[in-house]
Amino acid sequence: MSGTSEGPRPAAVAAAGIARPPVTERHTFGRTAAEPPGGHDAHTPGDAHTGAGAHAPCDAQDFRGAFRAAELAMAVIDDEGAVASANDALAVLLDTEPAALTGRAAADLVDLASDSRTWEAYRAVLERRRARFRCTRRLKHPDGRTVWAEVTVVPVPESRGALLSIADISDRRELQARLRHLQMHDPVTRLPNRTLFFERLASALEASAYDGVAYGVSPAYLDRRSYGDGRTGRIGLCYLDLDGFKAVNDTLGHRTGDRLLAAVATRLTECADHDGYTRSGGHLVARLGGDEFAILVEDSTGTEQLADLARSVLTALQRPFDLAGQRLSVSASIGVVERAAEGTTPTGLMQAADTTLYWAKADGKARWTLFDPERNAHRMTRQALTSTLRPAVEREEFVLQYQPLVGMADGAVRGVEALVRWNHPQFGTLAPNRFIGIAEEDGSIVQLGRWVLRTACRQARRWQLDHPHTRPLFVSVNVAVRQVWDSDLVADVAEILAETGLAPQLLQLELTESAVMGSAGRPLQALQALSDMGVRIAIDDFGTGYSNLAYLSRLPVSVLKLDGSFVRGFRYDEGVHPSPADETIVEAMIQLAHRLGLTVTAECVETSGQAARLQRIGCDTGQGWLFSRPVAPERIGEMVAASPRGA
Ligand code: C2E
Ligand code: MG
Ligand code: MG
């Protein structure tokens, strides 16, 4: 836009009478603007003699002249908003004569009636309910160019009219626009930058949220909307990161790096333009920082469109780049997200894109990956669990269930295994495989494990006190390897037994093979000390690890818990491929264990056929759904009460 004015001039300039008219006569209506005020005869005699060298005060004629001559476009309007008098500058601006403006509604001249808020504010000034009204208007000059005008209306003191002034701020607007462009674009690639990207994203999402409401929506959007073309209510994003760009920068220098980024930007723009050519405005390609780019697809038509776009980008980037004589090849990883705009926030969309890009990288780079809500939910819950686990341990959001350990010979409940569950306020009851691993990783297993041990021992003692005439149940508590390494397990056990009054013989600790294998030093000493105390040590899930019975027998271990997979191999009773090998192996294992002084518990006994077989081959104890699922402590109390006295 070419400069047509020197920017706004404050109304004060004209009102103070400082601005003198140009020497050339420009106007024909009434007096010429060039007529000097001194040429008029409206001075009062007193005015002319107010001291030697003093300025003579202006008369009404002077003011009228100043008004006409002012470079600021102005009009005096009456209380109905009709033009009483317009100055020359206004006439020039509107390409007419001042006289032609008299009587016209000022609101029509500068479009003040098109929206109700503006209209209300303008009327309030005319009716003297408000001291001033100001707005910016985009006017069409009769010569075709656009003029940005700052319109001000103030009441004229001691009169019923108001002064309307219009400053041409086109230059200021243009400067602002240029500055904004600089602020919103990346100098290396000339693409929109992160700020502009987020602005566009936010307004795209807002636009779908406020259906039909023009608040804060870009005009381009409104145009498309009012023509109803191609609105889908969906949004898509390709979030792209170059693979190994850092190496390019490090080995070939930042200049080459910048050239490469600019060349990549060009190819991305070509792909986006090709895909978006039917839409006005096309897709927005932005550089989000470093070697990260984004292609925003407003009104996307589904994942297929985004997948096609991502594919075309990967293909476009496969062609080597020729950068000032240097041939370079790059690849990129792309995270693709496509969804309904409603209910989507910029942060939500970017998080999904970020996660998906991470998957694309983790899956081997040089590929595009589509956002997968399930994969994300898993990651989210793991994240959510990790962050809430520690406080949950402090708040004791956990409960124990107990699963009977039954004598195979007589079917009597000998003991129970304590199994922990997390009553998560958000995710409901969680099984231990969801959080024990996390607790082991972040160390909170130590505190959780102590709570499990104390609660289980207290409960076992409670059953014993409640049922003094039956054989007391032992309680079997799972211990994670970190509890042996990172805490003084021996001291904890001793303290808890003393505190609860439970006999050490009624406590069994379950450790996995891997936890005790190769144990020497501290863990071995701990096992020994516990065993010396009278606490039994069981090897949990036996058979899944080294299964080195000879080695285990040298450790202070007294029970083997055979992993469920062995019992599951017993298929005779179900008539499906009998596999005597499993039974033979288990039988041999049990015999060997007995010879080494160990007792054997079988896990996952689900059918009576399995139980019968286990009993026949000499298994001591069984645990599984056939006998009972893990249950609340009250249920165990009832089982004890129902068992024969002294059993
Ligand atoms: P585990 O110690 O081997 O516990 C036995 C698991 O097998 C339990 O799963 C139990 O519900 C399940 N189970 C019992 N009978 C049957 C059956 O007949 N069929 C089948 N299919 N499954 C059966 P749960 O309660 O989900 O516990 C899983 C694992 O979590 C436990 O395996 C144990 O390793 C760990 N765990 C549980 N509580 C604790 C705890 O307080 N501390 C530690 N460190 N680990 C625990
Ligand atoms: Mg166990
Ligand atoms: Mg087990």
Image (tube, grey):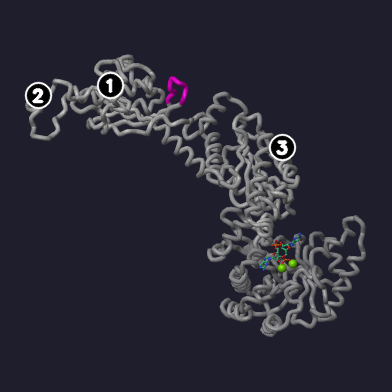
Q: Is mark 2 within 8 Å of ligand 1?
A: no
Q: Please state if 270 lies on the left or on the right of 127 as rendered.
A: right
Tag 1 secondary structure: strand
Q: Which residues are magenta?
A: 139-145
Mark 3 or 1, nearer chain start: 1
Q: Residues within 10 Å of mark 3 (few under 14, many from 20)?
A: few
207 falls in the magenta region? no
Which one is in front, 24 or 353? 24
**Image quadrant of ligand 2?**
bottom right
Q: Quadrant of residue 466?
A: bottom right
Residue 165 in the image, given as x and y percentages of width and height: 31, 27
Q: Is residue 64 above or below residue 468?
A: above
Question: Looking at the rendering, in which quadrant would you find the C terminus?
Answer: bottom right
Q: Is mark 3 within 8 Å of ligand 1?
A: no
Mark 3 against mark 1, which lies toward the viewer? 1
Q: Amino acid at mark 3?
A: Glu
Q: Please state if 214 lies on the left or on the right of 465 as rendered.
A: left
Mark 3 against mark 2, which lies toward the viewer? 2
Q: Which residue is mark 2?
A: 44
Give me the disc on residue 304: 3
Residue 487 in the image, given as x and y percentages of width and height: 61, 77
Give me the disc on residue 77: 1
